[in-house]
Amino acid sequence: MHAVLPLPGPIDPVPVPRPKPADEDARVNLIGISKAGIREVLIGAGLDERQARLRAKQLWHQIYNRGQRDFSAMSDIAKPQRAWLAERFEIARPEIVVEQVSTDGTRKWLLKTHDGHDYEMVFIPDADRGTLCVSSQVGCTLNCRFCHPGTMRLVRNLEPGEIVGQVMLARDALGEWPSQPEGRMLSNIVMMGMGEPLYNFDNVRDALKIVMDGDGLGLSRRRITLSTSGVVPMMARAGEEIGVNLAVSLHAVTKEVRDEIVPLNRKYGIEALLEACAAYPGANNARRITFEYVMLKDKNDSDADARELVRLLRKHKLPAKVNLIPFNPWPGTDYECSDETRIQSFSNIIFEAGISAPVRRPRGRDIMAACGQLKSAAEKKSRAELDRIAEQKQAQLG
Ligand code: SAH
């Protein structure tokens, strides 16, 4: 009998983070550990309760308010203790593989995990804000047809330190230490990079709790947006345990089209998704849910689609805004971006129904800032890797 292979598609992922290789630096990275967790590791390393509490507080301030990476420069800690800390701990950022700056100011980084996987982050400056687009996974399981990372396989969930690390790196690059209460360049965060944040719930929650901590990075939950393709069973917990703004990648208004472009829809359909949105804790007219809608020519962009979108949002009484995203094509995609006049007409219908429907401007096109593109480009360059894959395929066929 043949073993039955699992079907590809909308399945719940069970990613297994790989342990650090044994020959690697054995020091514990403090980035990504909660305040209470730091206290515990200090106690585990031999400090008494009272000392650990004081040191944890100092370290937290040094790491997340001052941006300090070097224990020896922590002048509020006694010198012998600084050396003691440096022997056991580190304050490590993700490794930067490539950093690019677009003519429009958009910056993009290709990063590497300690076990050698590439992932990305993007910083998008605007007149009144600066938004960091943060990744939650290396690769993705969702297979959205128009999305480039969606076509990569999932390698693993990012750890809390790798998620917080993205924010730390951006602050380093922008020279934004110590944490300022006002006038920050990095003012907003969107969990819209690679991956599905609600399939890495615990790590995303733990990371965002650190990012929101008032004694450290101090980003308000009102300036953080979590984007999901619609992992319905996790949405209430996201509202309760993280409490950030919600964005939903809707992209279609009929079962047929959404099943095709967002395969997760076969598992959690449009009605269930919109009900979960209506129940999202904290959503109200002052804090609307963003519905992302990528404009795909002759696929989801008709006037009838726009009217159906309005009907659905009204039916569920959703405090909504709609973000219309011109499709960013990538090599090998099946889709094209809708014409500008089509997008405008679609936007007008929603707008006339009293729902805000701005069209997102493409940013950083010259540096391929759309998600997944830098990673793919880097992968293309690795000839040896491609040869290896070709050999493997040959071996399988043979
Ligand atoms: N998995 C989550 C988080 C990733 S954000 C989610 O799907 O919401 C993914 C967003 O990137 C989508 O909402 C989509 O708007 C955008 N996106 C992905 N590929 C795109 C492309 N080729 N062109 C334009 N936007 C794209």
Image (cartoon, rainbow, N blue to C red):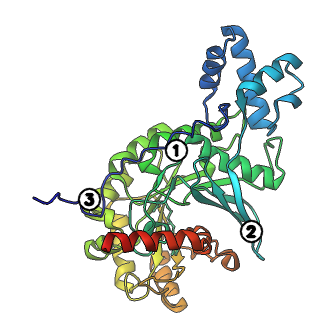
Residue placed under numbered mark 2 in the picture: 100
Occupied quadrant, residue 104: bottom right
On-image quarter of the C terminus? bottom left
- Label 1 neighbour load within 10 Å: few <14, some 14-19, many 20+: many
Camera-near label (3 vs 2) is 2
Q: Is residue 243 visible?
A: no
Say which of 367 and 154 sits in front. Answer: 154
- Label 2 neighbour load within 10 Å: few <14, some 14-19, many 20+: some
Residue 198, position as x, y percentages in the image? 43, 49
Residue placed under numbered mark 3 in the picture: 267
Occupied quadrant, residue 103: bottom right
The residues bearing labels 1 and 3 have C-alpha atoms spaced at a distance of: 22 Å
Say which of 272 and 278 sits in front. Answer: 272
The residues bearing labels 2 and 1 have C-alpha atoms spaced at a distance of: 26 Å
Residue placed under numbered mark 1 in the picture: 204
Residue 156, position as x, y percentages in the image? 47, 51
The mark that comes first in sequence, 2 or 1, is: 2
Q: Is residue 111 above or below residue 31?
A: below
